[in-house]
Image (cartoon, rainbow, N blue to C red):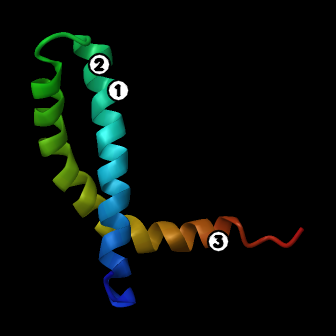
Amino acid sequence: MLSQRYQRLVQPLLMSLFMTILMTFVITWVNTGLDAGFAARWLQAFLIAWPIAFMVILVIMKPVMRLSAHICSKET
């Protein structure tokens, strides 16, 4: 296993991986259907989308965490 200091990279890496797999699969399926060329089209979409998603998550993760803490700060 990795040291806890890598969690700040592993968490967005895994989040972007899982979300990109799911979203590119669904969008490719809806737009082009499940046929013989589906896997190649999905893989191409995934390889383009995953690095973008990873970088976006790295940039926006802290501001989103602060915003969500602010939104959920009311005691009930």
Residue 51 coordinates in the image, percent (x, y): 17, 55
Proximity of marks 2 and 1: CB atoms separated by less than 8 Å: yes
Amino acid beneath label 2: Trp
What's the residue at 32%, 55% (across, down)?
Answer: 16
Q: Which numbered dot is residue 26?
A: 1
Residue 1 coordinates in the image, percent (x, y): 33, 81
Mark 2 to mark 3: distance in Å? 37 Å
Q: Who comes first in sequence, dot 2 or dot 3?
A: 2
Mark 3 to mark 1: distance in Å? 32 Å
Mark 2 to mark 1: distance in Å? 5 Å
Toward the right, the furthest residue is 76
Mark 3 sits on what residue?
Answer: 70
Q: Secondary structure at mark 3?
A: helix
Horizontal side of 7 relative to 56 (left or right) equals right
Mark 2 sits on what residue?
Answer: 29
Q: Who comes first in sequence, dot 3 or dot 1?
A: 1
Q: Is residue 65 above or below residue 27?
A: below
Mark 2 closeness class: few <14, some 14–19, many ≥20 residues within 10 Å: some
